[in-house]
Amino acid sequence: MKKVLTSALIAGCILFMLSYGGLFFAVKFFPQFFVEYNSPLFNSTGSRDVLFYLHPFIISFALSWFWERFKGMFKGAILLRGLEFGLVYSVIALLPVMWISFSALDITITMVLSWFAYGLGQALIAGVVFARINP
């Protein structure tokens, strides 16, 4: 259990830093993309902002549990195991969520694809961390 929690916390910290560094990078170099977020769909009072900032930790703890449960199914070198884990998660969890989001919400395909890429990146990074720390 200690390895599950430790790897989740480490992955959460890495994802947090990369997520927010990537956000600032993206806003600076792709500002036209973020104009789409000036929609009533994304306006918030700020009362739930902490939930947004906790996301890298929530996903890393969930993925760490998933890794612990199924790590024996991923074979090969550390990098290969981590990448396969990220791809499996993306196909079984992200793809259906992105499909329903696009079909139910007034959002663009660009948004959905960027969210999918972001989630895939998170899962790939977390998978490599888990394969390294908790083989």
Image (tube, rainbow, N blue to C red):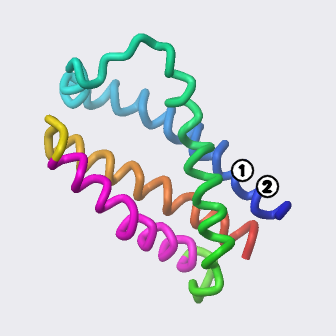
The kind of residue on which mark 1 rests is Ile
**Does residue 92 sit above or below 102 in this rendering?**
below
**Does residue 68 sit above or below 126 in this rendering?**
below
Q: Which residue is mark 1?
A: 10
Quarter in which the N terminus is drawn: bottom right
Position in image of residue 44 (x %, y %): 37, 16
Position in image of residue 129 (x %, y %): 65, 62
Helix, strand or loop at disc 1? helix
Left/right of residue 59 with respect to residue 29 in the rendered view? right
The kind of residue on which mark 2 rests is Thr
Q: Which residue is mark 2?
A: 6
**Residue at image x 65%, y 53%?**
61
- Callout 1: 10 Å neighbours few (<14), some, many (20+)? some
Residue ranking furthest to the right:
2
Our reading of the magenta stretch's main secondary structure is helix
- Residue 53 sits in quarter: top right
- Residue 106 sits in quarter: top left
Q: Nearer the viewer, residue 11 or 107?
A: 107
Residue ranking furthest to the front:
104
On whether residue 90 falls in the magenta region, the answer is yes
Left/right of residue 131 with respect to residue 127 in the rendered view? right
Verify CB contact (< 8 Å) between mark 2 and mark 1.
yes
The magenta stretch is 80-103
